[in-house]
Image: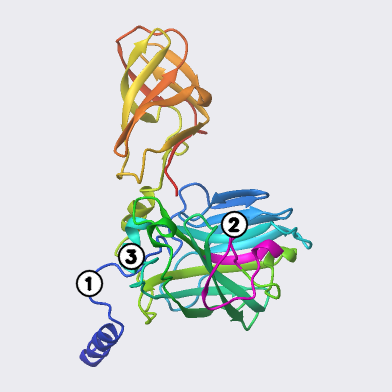
Amino acid sequence: MTKAAELAKMGEVLTNNQIGGRRNIVINGAMLVAQRSTSTQFSGANGFVCDRFECSNQTDGAITFSQSTDVPSGQGFINSTKINVDTADTSLTATQHALFQQKVEGLNSSQLMWGTSNAENISVSFWIKSSLTGTFTYYALDESADSQSYVQTFTIDSANTWEKKTFIIEGPTTGGTTDFPITNARSFFTGICLGVGSTHQTSTTGSWHSTANFAASTSSAVKLIGTASANMYVTGWQIELGNQATPFEHASSFGETLALCQRYFHRWDGTTGGNNTEFCIGFVSSTNSARGVYFYPQIMRSNPALSASGSFRFWDGNVRSVTSGNIVVQRGNVNSSFVQFTSSAGTQYRPCEMSANGADCFIDFNSEL
């Protein structure tokens, strides 16, 4: 880079107020991390592909979310989330909805002071590409999605073309910490609407309004879920304090983004190491079970729930096969879990190794909002 270019870049940084700190309130906005899978279909279900971004599909249609390498040129991105409508729902009932959203933790958004007279505006920006054109909606909701809603329209002008969208959302000045907690609980929802029924539609756009049933769109907005084979790609999702949308804040490393995601979800994966991949060292705690302490790679948001899949074992001189349904947390906190494997008789108090018993297993620790 020439000296002139360096000076120009410095001027851009100063203009966009990019000095110090982490600006982006959204985690994994570049869609880099996908711990669970790289492609999953959701039909009448909620779940994740790219970490922290939830598919909430409560319709009669089916949507596949996948981590894609289709990205806008020259922006430094390598991944996006692809949303593909496998089965359309052309007649949504009043309460049905399809959403692509992130739930924001209160400890990550306290600087916004939402719910008070000092509430700050936020600047929202993202890159989007869709096979459908027309008016779509972006939304923000209070922590329980039953008190306040904000709907912002935006237009996709050209089909199958990457476009950058930016707009300002006013800070809500009522509701206090009841509607917008500043704890480790959820403070607000924010996302892109893929289609909602009449209960979740509003004619009020560009401002907060009270509602007992969350509003995420208007009656005239495009419903992606209503068109079979329709698709949408999203990346570069950023929310920042103030009225100036700045260039996307790329993480300093993949590890930084992964660590932020692991506060909410962590998967111990035995699928790559295969048989004998060690989970932890423990001891035979009774004649039919073993216990061991598993330390998470990051401090988690709250005590996580455990779920396991596949075949496991503990070994105390002999192999004791364990099914996924016989793995539970005995005691846990945000740092570690005391995990129990239950199986056939072992030698009590003998040290043992707790591990995979095949190449098809994983254990999830989940403290999503």
Q: Position of residue 366 (x, y in %)?
A: 44, 41
Residue that label 3 marks: 251
- Disc 3 secondary structure class: loop
Q: Residues within 10 Å of mark 3 (few under 14, many from 20)?
A: some
Q: Nearer the viewer, residue 13 or 303?
A: 303
- Disc 2 secondary structure class: strand
* Residue placed furthest toward the bottom: 4
Q: Amino acid at mark 3?
A: Ala
Q: Which residues are magenta?
A: 191-216
Asked whether disc 2 touches disc 1, contact meaning CB atoms under 8 Å apart, the reply is no
Q: Residues within 10 Å of mark 2 (few under 14, many from 20)?
A: many
Q: Amino acid at mark 2?
A: Phe
Residue that label 2 marks: 65
Q: Amino acid at mark 1?
A: Gly
Q: Earlier in the sequence, mark 1 or mark 3?
A: 1
Q: Nearer the viewer, residue 340 or 140?
A: 140
